[in-house]
Every structure is written in structure tokens, then in C-alpha cells.
Image (spheres, rainbow, N blue to C red):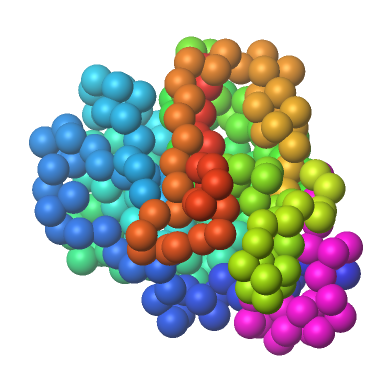
């Protein structure tokens, strides 16, 4: 099953319809960024701490990894940094370009898979920012390896990812019984666990196919490469996106790592 093709169809459709991850950032956020105050998230309901960001953005080479949609990229570009947006969805990249053109901001864009950043030479960036998106790849360690390669020594990597427990929940059981039940093993794959009908719906573009990675891969995969984790927090889907897992534990994890 070509999950990459299925996910690209879904994200292009979602982006054209201006789904939640394709709605532009505000002009107020861009204006704040011009004066050095950056307000972005790599999860849904909690902003990245200001202390995680560089004191001076001007002249920094910044990569927004799987960060298209007109949300983080224009804000980062407004700081004076040299920003590149890399995304699998050409429509998500268009959203970035649209906002930046409206605001008089310059960025570079590249379309491709997050597991393959071969378009960039080693040590190209000072900072890589990756909102929740590794749930759409079956091998998160490949992503981390590529991020490590393109970062300069001393460079930082800020990422958000799904709490693995969220993929263990039996959603159908909860909807029918109102009770929480853990049924799926981690690592998890939609390609192995969804019903035939659910897979067919995804192929038609109505949904994406996701993967639930272990903490050994999500966190250990970073430290095994030599990254030093210097920041950590958890967050929820929040009121805007009520989710089952929020009733028992945080839905997301965010980390800041330094090479």
C-alpha cells in the first residue's frame, strides 16, 4: 500500500479546503515576529516557550520541516531569518507562499518526503522546526537522522509528536460503551489495523494513514544520534479539537534538542 500517495492526496485536499492546519497565521503574529517576539506552536494548544528560541533571528538559516500551511513559516520569515519550508504537500507549500507574498516576506520552498532531505547539503541550518507530522511516516528514525545531518553543530531542533498511547485506544469501543480500552500495540500502523472500509475511504482522500511510534524511537531516536534534549513539555488537543485521549493524559509531547 502506497501510504505516501494516500497521505499526499489527503493533505492536498485538506489544504485546498483550508482545514485547521491550512489556515493562515494572523497579521498580529507576523507583526510581533518583526520585532523579535515569536509565537508559534508545534502542538495544538500550547505555544513553544520563548526561551527555546534564539535571542537574535536575523541571518539564521531556519528549516520548517513538514510545516506548510501558512502558519509557522510566515512568522519565522518575519523575524529576518532565512527560512525554508519543506513539505510533502504542494498545496501546503502554496499556503506558505500565499501568506508570505501578502506580507512581503521571502522564503524558499522545497517539496519532498521528510525522511529524505537530500536536497540540502550537510550542516545547512541553524534551527529546524517540526510541528506534529511524524505520525505520517513509518520510520521516524530516518527523519531524525536527516535532521541531525542538515543541522550545524550547536544547532537546535524543536519538534512536536503524538503521545504513543493515543494509538492504543479503541475508539469504536469508546463511542459504543463510553469506556476507555487499550487494544493496539505500539509501534502502531493504520495500514495494519484499520478495516478494509476505512482503508478504502483513505484511498478516496477522506482521511490520512498514520503511524504511532514508540518513545524509544521518538526520544531515544534523537539521543542515539547524539542530540542532547534540553527542553520537554506535554500538551493537549485542547477545546478546539476535543479528543478522547485528553480525558486521561496529554495528547502530545514536544522536545527541544541541540546537536
Q: Position of residue 214 (x, y in %)?
A: 75, 37
x, y percentage for residue 211? 74, 54
Q: Relative to residue 107, is residue 7 depicted above or below?
A: below
Q: Magenta stretch: residue 114 in it?
A: no
| Location of residue 207 in the rendering, given as x and y in whole percent from the top left corner | 64, 75
* Rendered location of residue 216, percent (x, y): 75, 28
162 relative to 240, above or below = above
Which residue: 40% across, 32% down? 61
Rendered residue at 56%/59% (across/down): 244
Residues rendered magenta in the picture: 187-208
Residue 172 in view here: yes
Q: Is residue 39 left or right of residue 226?
A: left
- Nearer to the camera, 251 or 54: 251
32 and 174: which is toward the camera: 174
Tell me if I can see residue 122 in this picture. no
| Along the viewing direction, whichever of 187 and 168 lies nearer the viewer | 168
- Asked whether residue 192 is drawn in magenta, I would say yes
Q: Quadrant of the N terminus?
A: bottom right
Image quarter (top left, top right, bottom left or bottom right) of the C terminus? top right
Residue found at x 81% / y 84%? 197
Residue 24 picture quarter:
bottom left
Where residue 76 sits, quadrant-wise, is: top left
Amino acid at each position: 500500500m502506497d501510504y505516501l500517495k494516500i497521505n499526499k492526496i489527503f493533505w492536498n485536499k485538506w489544504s485546498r479546503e483550508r482545514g485547521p492546519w491550512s489556515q493562515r497565521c494572523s497579521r498580529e503574529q507576523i507583526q510581533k515576529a518583526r520585532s523579535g517576539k515569536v509565537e508559534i506552536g508545534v502542538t495544538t494548544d500550547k505555544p513553544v516557550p520563548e526561551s527555546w528560541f534564539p535571542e537574535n533571528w536575523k541571518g539564521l538559516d531556519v528549516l520548517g520541516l513538514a510545516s506548510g500551511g501558512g502558519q509557522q513559516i510566515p512568522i519565522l520569515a518575519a523575524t529576518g531569518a532565512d527560512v525554508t519550508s519543506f513539505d510533502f504537500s504542494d498545496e501546503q507549500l502554496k499556503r506558505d507562499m500565499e501568506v508570505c507574498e501578502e506580507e512581503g516576506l521571502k522564503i524558499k520552498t522545497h517539496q519532498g518526503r521528510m525522511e529524505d532531505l537530500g536536497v540540502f547539503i550537510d550542516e545547512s541550518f541553524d534551527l529546524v522546526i517540526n510541528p506534529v507530522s511524524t505520525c505520517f511516516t513509518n520510520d521516524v528514525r530516518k527523519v531524525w537522522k536527516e535532521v541531525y545531518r542538515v543541522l550545524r553543530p550547536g544547532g537546535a531542533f524543536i519538534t512536536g509528536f503524538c503521545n504513543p498511547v493515543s494509538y492504543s485506544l479503541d475508539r469504536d469501543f469508546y463511542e459504543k460503551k463510553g469506556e476507555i480500552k487499550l487494544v493496539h500495540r505500539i509501534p502502531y500502523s493504520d495500514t495494519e489495523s484499520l478495516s478494509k472500509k476505512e482503508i478504502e475511504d483513505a484511498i478516496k482522500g477522506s482521511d490520512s494513514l498514520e503511524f504511532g511510534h514508540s518513545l524509544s524511537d521518538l526520544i531515544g531516536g534523537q539521543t542515539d544520534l547524539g542530540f542532547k534534549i534540553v527542553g520537554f513539555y506535554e500538551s493537549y488537543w485542547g477545546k478546539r479539537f476535543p479528543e478522547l485521549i485528553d480525558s486521561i493524559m496529554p495528547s502530545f509531547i514536544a522536545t527541544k534538542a541541540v546537536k
